[in-house]
Image: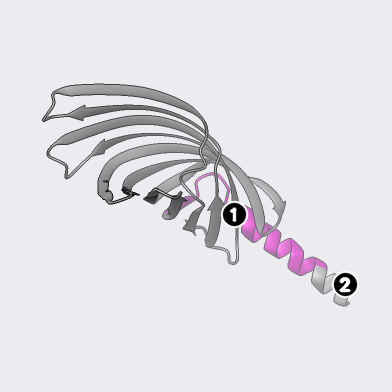
Amino acid sequence: MNKFISTLILIISTIAVKAQTDKGTVFVGGGISYNSQTSKDPTNHSKHINMDLLPTVGVFLGNNWSIGLTPQYSYARDSSFYKYDDYSSKSGHKSKLLGIGLSVRHYWMIIPQLALFPELSGSYLFSVGDAGASAKSYNMNITPNMAFFPTKHIAITFGYGGLRYLHQTNKDTALGTTASYNTFGFNVNQGMILGVNYHFTN
């Protein structure tokens, strides 16, 4: 009897979780990432801080396949302190970026309450709040993620790293200069992305 009840509970939970990734399911939520890096040597001390806010709304277009729209806010701060003998100097820079992104996910259920999903995303960001300089960037990312479903409607997500292509243009208004660059490689500067999504299921 106990074995039968356990099997029945497992089947019910599997059906309930599967409904979270069925075609037509809508979800809202988002994620946040924070990363801090510090470098020290006898004469120089530098620190980089980066934070991203990623609210998301999406829909499953097919079983286990979803598409989402993500407004984005990114904040970064760099500071450095240099000292040699009696000479010392400080410098720092802050940047704020706003933008919009689009993502596609595919879920692989490992167990009824746990799934792995790679995410393909692209976004456009532009700087705000800096009169002396401006920046625009386009990026594409492939990020590995994991989702844990503690209830029928809730998904807790974890993501880190992945591959990233970035094209950015920086313009200095005071100097009248413009510089562009491209990067491609593993994105380890963003930090772990922690998120919570609510799935509107029956």
In this view, 2 is above or below 185: below
Is 15 contained in the magenta span? yes
Residue 137 pos. (x, y %): 32, 31
In this view, 172 is above or below 160: above
Quadrant housing residue 14: bottom right
Residue drawn at 33 percent across, 45 percent down: 72
Label 2 packing within 10 angstroms: few (<14), some (14-19), many (20+): few
Residue drawn at 67 percent across, 58 percent down: 15
Q: Which residue is mark 2?
A: 3
Q: Which residue is mark 1?
A: 147
Name the one closer to the observer, 12 or 188: 188
In this view, 75 is above or below 120: below
Q: Is residue 168 visible?
A: yes
- Check contact, mark 1 vs mark 2: CB within 8 A: no
Q: Amino acid at mark 2?
A: Lys
The segment highlighted magenta reads: 7-28
Name the one closer to the observer, 17 or 160: 160
Is 88 contained in the magenta span? no
In this view, 98 is above or below 155: above
The label nearer to you, 1 versus 2, is 1
Residue 116 pos. (x, y %): 64, 47
Q: Amino acid at mark 1?
A: Ala
Label 2 secondary element: helix
Quadrant housing residue 166: top left
Whether residue 124 sits left or right of residue 187 in the image: it is left
Q: How is the image coloured?
A: one colour
